[in-house]
Structure formats: structure tokens, C-alpha cells
Amino acid sequence: MIPQKWIATFDDDVVFLITGQFKKIPTFKNKLKNALKFKKPVLVLRFNDDQEDQEQVVEISQKFCKKNNIPLVLNIPNKWNFRCDGIHLKSNELDKNPRKDKILGASCHNKNDIQAAINLGADYIFLSPIIAKAESQPIGWDAYFELCLMFPNIKIIPLGGVNEMNSMTDSYAGISHWWDLQTSQ
């Protein structure tokens, strides 16, 4: 359930900013500043088990988001152990029983995933990949809009090759469209 304080953020032009890869904490801090270039960002902190300084990265994200009034959603190992505004589940985690007092997002790749996410009470869904990238087989915009019509009561956000220039929706999610921006020191 989206907490009341974030309801206005989750309207039609919200942009989900998923963190990309980094090796050093100063690089991470600098890249976070790119989030300030967006009108209604939601920060989705994502990293794998092998990320160094995991607790420090979460703490930096918490402070940044609090200072800038940006919702923080965690898509990381041990996501249940940290304070945050929301949790994002991978498609292979759609059998979990998440807390109901946080924003709940889910990554989906097909109709069955979407139904499972809805059954869990997801507030939004990332549907991917929409556009071909590397070796992925894209869903495409036609299938995206068809699934949106099938499931009109959930916010389905396009992900995968989508950015501000090619998105056919006002809301979208991505990594490289914001993570790779040049920031001033």
C-alpha cells in the first residue's frame, strides 16, 4: 500500500530510477545527484550479493532520499532488514509475503507474473523488456498496452530499453537513462 505521504508522487508522470553498477562510494554518491533532474522520481536501489559496503550504500541512499523527499524502494538482498519506503520483488520472489505498510513493486515478464503480483497486493509493476537490448526478446509496445488493458487496476511501468525520448507513456523505469548522465562535481 502506498503510504499517504507518497500518493502524489505515484501519479501518471512518475519516473522510477533504478541504480546501476558502481565500484566506489564516491561514484555512487555522485550518480545519485542525477535523480534531482527529474520532477517526480522514485529511487529503486538495486544491487547484487557481491556489492561491497552494502549497509553503507543503503544508509547513503536513505539520507539522500530523506533530504530530497524522494521515496526509496529496495530491490536488494536482505531488503526486509532495512528501513525504506518500499520493497521491489523480482519475478522469482512473487511467492513472498510482503509487509502491507510499504510501497510494493514487482518485476514481471508476462501475464502470469502480473496476476501473481496483483494477488500479492503490488502497487506497481515493471513490465520488461519492452524494447530489444542485447540478447533479450522484447515484449514490444503493442503487448505492453494490451496487458495494460487486461489489468487496468494496476500501474504497469515499461522497463527495458525505455527512456524519456522513446517512451510511449509518461511514466517509465530505467537505469542508463539517468545513471549514465554526466553530473557536475
Image (cartoon, rainbow, N blue to C red):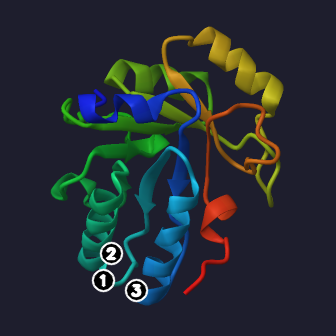
* Residue that badge 2 annotates: 57
Quadrant placement of the N terminus: top left
Count of numbered circles in the view: 3
Q: Residues within 10 Å of mark 3 (few under 14, many from 20)?
A: some
State the separation of the CA atoms marked 2 and 1: 6 Å
Left or right, 37 with reference to 154: right
Residues at marks 2 and 3 touching, judged by CB atoms closer than 8 Å: yes
Residue 120 sits above or below residue 170 on the image: above
The residue type indicated by label 3 comes to Ile
Residues at marks 1 and 3 touching, judged by CB atoms closer than 8 Å: yes
Please provide percent x and percent y for residue 137: 79, 45
Residues at marks 2 and 1 touching, judged by CB atoms closer than 8 Å: yes
- Residues 74 and 77: in front is 74
Secondary structure found at label 3: helix
* Residue that badge 1 annotates: 53
Left or right, 172 with reference to 154: right
The residue type indicated by label 1 comes to Asp
Left or right, 54 with reference to 109: left
Q: Residues within 10 Å of mark 2 (few under 14, many from 20)?
A: some
User: Which label sits in the foreground, 1 or 3?
Assistant: 3
- Residues 65 and 44: in front is 65
Q: Earlier in the sequence, mark 1 or mark 3?
A: 3
Number of the label disc, if any, that sits on residue 25 = 3
Q: Residues within 10 Å of mark 1 (few under 14, many from 20)?
A: few
Residue 76 sits above or below residue 53 on the image: above
